[in-house]
Amino acid sequence: HEYGRKGLATEEEVQRCIDSLADAVSVIESNVAPVRRMLSFLEDNFDPMKAEPEFSLKLSSSSFISPSRSSGSAFSSYNSMNRFGFGSGGDSSGPTLSHNHPTQYTFVRQSLKLWCKVQENMHRLWVCADDDLLSTTHGYSLWNTGQGLNRVQTCPRVAKVMHTLLGETRTESSAAWVGLSVVHLGDRDVPNALIFIDKYTQIPRFLQPIVSFIDSIPKLCEDQHVADYIEDEFGGERRLKMYVLKDYFKHGFDGSGDDGGSCIDGRLTSSWNWTSQVAKKRYYNILMMSGFQGFDGDFK
């Protein structure tokens, strides 16, 4: 009866608002979930101070070894390092960062924590991005950024939110901040707010396939032939899981890529660079068996 009063919303309008809020929460939860899952993989499988010899996250820009898949068998179980071939992998440009295991662990953990906050506040960032793009006080210029002509425009509203989220992440971290705190916005790396939004909405799209693959390993091993293959190639389920996680936590955060590095944007660039190299990984065949179709398509 209250809905019929003049000036108040109708019952249908209230229900629409409730449904809209439910949809917004659902989207946020689905996007945050794979980031939180990767964070749990890091915390549950890696010691922050002491690394397992075969699964250290130590990075060295001077000792990078290019993927050896092109020479000899793509899935050879033996090389000069150890029986299961847990050597370095990564993109052709190699890491630009040099971190010991504890530093790299902290670097990855802080990055994932920040990504969680960004995904939780994505609707807020969208609103700010719209306001920045449609601003009548901050115009834009066309620049050749190295990727063609782009609309370069300052993003004060998005920048304010990002610096707030970054500040919260730094405050909540129990360790000193690792890497740079530079947030690229309105420059050649991230020309405008729309490109910023586009970059950060990709995070769950490339993390979810990794999560799905890790979670599918026990199911895959129910097939004895697959289990025997994993045993012969990697030394069992856990070693395969650890190899994949080590590979991503090292080379998804190694500063590689055209505009990589330890800055806030560079961390994301390194992860995207890692996805472009996945077909060269030793575990690619198993990845395909799990139903992987790519980082920009259906995830089955």
Image: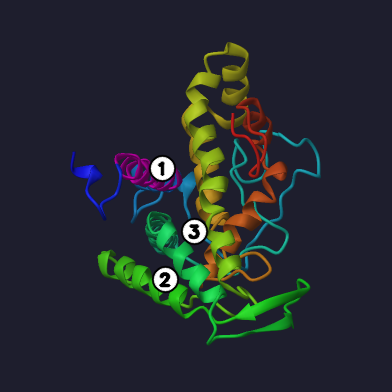
Residue at x 51% of width, y 33% of height: 212
Check the picture and name the quadrant holding the C terminus. top right
Q: Is residue 179 above or below residue 239?
A: below
One can see residue 177 in this view: no
Q: Residue furthest left?
A: 2
Q: Amino acid at mark 3?
A: Lys
Say if the magenta span includes residue 13: yes
Q: Looking at the image, is mark 3 or mark 2 nearer the viewer?
A: 2
> CB of mark 2 within 8 Å of CB of mark 1?
no
Q: Which mark is residue 162?
A: 2
Q: Examine the image and state in which quarter residue 144 appears.
A: bottom right
- The residue that disc 1 covers is 23
- State the colouring used for the structure image: rainbow
Q: Secondary structure at mark 1?
A: helix
Q: Is residue 137 above or below residue 42?
A: below
Say if the magenta span includes residue 295: no
Q: Which mark is residue 58?
A: 3
